[in-house]
């Protein structure tokens, strides 16, 4: 498991919201070992979906930033003395 998820407040909140559902789903089982394994399986599935969604968002944000930088660099090449463009690139 990627332990950085344990520092992700969104992940923690979503998992805390889902844990009671997982417990309820398997409440009829008498074998506590099987119950625990099934709840772990649910957590693992949830974590994988959450991580994929999070990675997709980060990748999308990264692409948007790269497009913005490329756009500003193109403008800077056309107007090399425009201080506003230079400042935007640096921030």
Image (cartoon, rainbow, N blue to C red):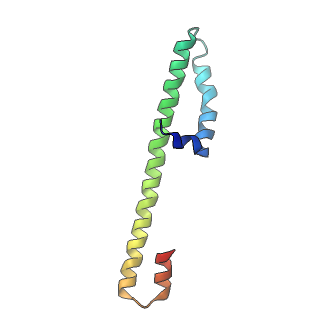
Residue drawn at the location 61% of the way across and 39% of the way down: 12
Give left or right: position of 87 versus 13.
Answer: left
Q: Is residue 26 above or below residue 45?
A: above
Q: Percent x, y for residue 4?
A: 52, 43
The quadrant in which residue 26 appears is top right
- In the image, 7 versus 49, the foreground residue is 7
Residue drawn at the location 39% of the way across and 75% of the way down: 71
Q: Percent x, y for residue 17?
A: 63, 34
Residue drawn at the location 60% of the way across and 12% of the way down: 28
The quadrant in which residue 74 appears is bottom left
Q: Percent x, y for residue 90?
A: 48, 76
Q: In this view, does 73 lie above or below 53?
A: below
Q: How many labels does the image show?
A: 0
Q: In this view, does 16 lie above or below 23?
A: below
- In the image, 27 versus 4, the foreground residue is 4
Q: Is residue 34 above or below residue 61?
A: above
Q: Percent x, y for residue 18?
A: 60, 32
Question: Seen from this angle, which residue lies furthest front?
Answer: 3
Residue drawn at the location 48% of the way across and 25% of the way down: 41
Question: Seen from this angle, which residue lies furthest top?
Answer: 30
Question: Seen from this angle, which residue lies furthest bottom?
Answer: 81
């Amino acid at each position: 498991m990627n332990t950085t998820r344990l520092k992700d407040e969104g992940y923690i909140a979503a998992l805390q919201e889902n844990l009671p559902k997982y417990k309820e789903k398997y409440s009829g089982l008498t074998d506590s070992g099987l119950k625990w394994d099934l709840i772990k399986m649910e957590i693992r599935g949830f974590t994988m979906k959450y991580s994929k969604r999070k990675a997709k968002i980060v990748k999308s944000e990264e692409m948007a930033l790269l497009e913005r930088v490329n756009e500003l660099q193109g403008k800077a090449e056309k107007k090399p003395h425009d201080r506003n463009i230079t400042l935007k690139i640096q921030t």
